[in-house]
Image (cartoon, grey):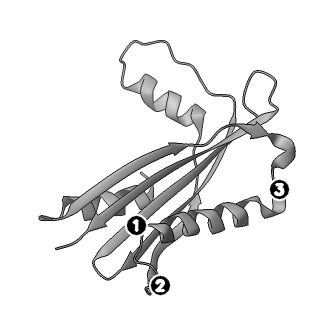
Amino acid sequence: KNELAQRLAEHTAAAGDQCEFSVTVRPSVGVEHLPIAEEELQELSRRAEAIAQEGLPHGGEYVVAYTGEHLYSPEAAARATASQGDGDALVVDRAEWRGWASLLQSGDRDVGVLLLRRKYMPDAGLQFQDLVLRWRRERP
């Protein structure tokens, strides 16, 4: 289980908290717009933190409680699903996935962001798409 997901689950379980969750799927774009490979993680990191900051009070101070690369393997996910024995046919996503997770805390608010990038998408492999999962919690 991803460390960010574990932290979010722990925070969400606390009594009296108000939580909000959103998913944004950005339009697919041609791979020619990708940053060079050596700078891609840095770009994902900057964007994930900037998106998380949007959910914090304007101009306030915050603490980075967690930040790190999110690893996702479609093959591992397919194997895990198969081991549960639900009998459905499995389809493995051949696109390459990469992501960054950030958890920021400010006063009585926590904001977690998981920015996922799915690139070299089938059929031609000439597109990429970003998905943003954002979680926000208000503590009493």
Q: Which marked residue is nearer to the observer: mark 3 or mark 1?
A: 1
Q: Few, some or many C-alpha atoms within 10 Å of disc 3 (few <14, some 14-19, many ≥20)?
A: few
Q: Few, some or many C-alpha atoms within 10 Å of disc 2 (few <14, some 14-19, many ≥20)?
A: few
With respect to residue 31, does 4 lie above or below? Answer: below
36 horizontally vs 27: left or right: right
Residue at (22, 72) in percent of width and height? 139
Q: Residue furthest bottom?
A: 61
The disc label shown at residue 64, or none: none
Residue at (43, 13) in percent of width and height? 88
Residue at mark 1: 111
- One can see residue 119 in this view: no
Residue at mark 2: 59
Q: Amino acid at mark 3?
A: Ala
Residue at (75, 59) in percent of width and height? 40
Element under disc 1? strand
Residue at mark 3: 37
- State the separation of the CA atoms marked 3 and 2: 33 Å
Residue at (75, 39) in percent of width and height? 29
121 horizontally vs 76: left or right: right
Q: Amino acid at mark 1?
A: Val
Q: Few, some or many C-alpha atoms within 10 Å of disc 1 (few <14, some 14-19, many ≥20)?
A: many
Element under disc 3? helix
* First along the sequence among labels 3 and 2: 3
Q: Amino acid at mark 2?
A: Gly
The quadrant holding residue 127 is top right
Task: Identify the image quadrant of the C terminus.
Answer: bottom left
